[in-house]
């Protein structure tokens, strides 16, 4: 895994780093509020960046940690959408975002409005 600062020049992303043998990494992920780019050969390595200690966990604990991470991300994004997004929510969208999470939400066709720079909520 390799991490570089995400510096764009004239809207162009930085040149991806290469491994010692000159080959490219399989995966790239923006992280740290968009300030870093993480390169890895496996999704597990990227998850290890997001979830400290992930690679040392067994399968069940890895699954549990992914669920907890996803839940934490969902709660933060929902709070952002309700409290701070620069878009107007419909009453149905607001009810969906504020509903208890013991049951999956029931949503009609449609998409929630874009949430802007929500990735900033997940800085390491």
Image (cartoon, rainbow, N blue to C red):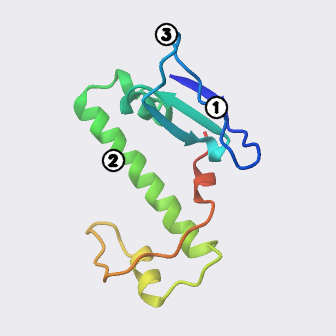
Q: Secondary structure at mark 2?
A: helix
Crowd class of label 2 (few under 14; some 14 to 19; many from 20; radius 10 Å): few
Q: Single out the mark in the foreground, 2 or 3.
A: 3
- The label number, if any, that marks residue 15 in the structure image: 1
| Position in image of residue 75 (x %, y %) | 47, 61
Q: Secondary structure at mark 3?
A: loop
Q: Earlier in the sequence, mark 1 or mark 3?
A: 1
* Residue at left offset 28%, top offset 33%: 61
Instruction: State the CA–CA distance, disc 1 to disc 3.
Output: 17 Å
Q: Single out the mark in the foreground, 1 or 2.
A: 1
From the viewer's perspective, tell me whether residue 53 is left or right of residue 124.
left
Crowd class of label 3 (few under 14; some 14 to 19; many from 20; radius 10 Å): few
In the image, residue 43 sits, relative to residue 19, either above or below, namely: below
**Number of numbered labels in the structure image:** 3
Q: Is mark 1 in CB contact (under 8 Å) with mark 3?
A: no
Q: Secondary structure at mark 1?
A: loop
In the image, residue 105 sits, relative to residue 38, either above or below, namely: below
Q: Which residue is mark 2?
A: 67
Q: Quadrant of residue 117?
A: bottom right
Q: Which residue is mark 3?
A: 21
- Work out which residue is located at the far top of the displayed protein and give it: 21
Q: Nearer the viewer, residue 116 or 50?
A: 116
* Residue at left offset 42%, top offset 34%: 47
Q: Quadrant of the C terminus?
A: top right
- The label number, if any, that marks residue 95 in the structure image: none
Instruction: State the CA–CA distance, disc 1 to disc 2.
Output: 33 Å
From the viewer's perspective, tell me whether residue 66 is left or right of residue 15.
left
């Amino acid at each position: 895994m390799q991490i570089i600062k995400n510096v764009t020049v004239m809207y162009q992303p930085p040149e991806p780093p290469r491994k010692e043998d000159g080959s490219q990494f399989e995966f790239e992920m923006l992280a740290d509020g968009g300030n870093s780019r993480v390169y890895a050969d496996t999704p597990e390595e990227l998850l290890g960046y997001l979830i400290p200690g992930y690679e040392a966990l067994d399968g069940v604990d890895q699954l549990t940690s992914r669920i907890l991470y996803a839940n934490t991300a969902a709660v933060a994004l929902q709070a952002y959408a309700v409290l701070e997004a620069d878009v107007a929510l419909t009453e149905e969208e607001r009810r969906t975002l504020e509903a208890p999470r013991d049951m999956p939400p029931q949503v009609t066709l449609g998409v929630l409005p874009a949430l802007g720079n929500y990735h900033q909520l997940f800085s390491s």
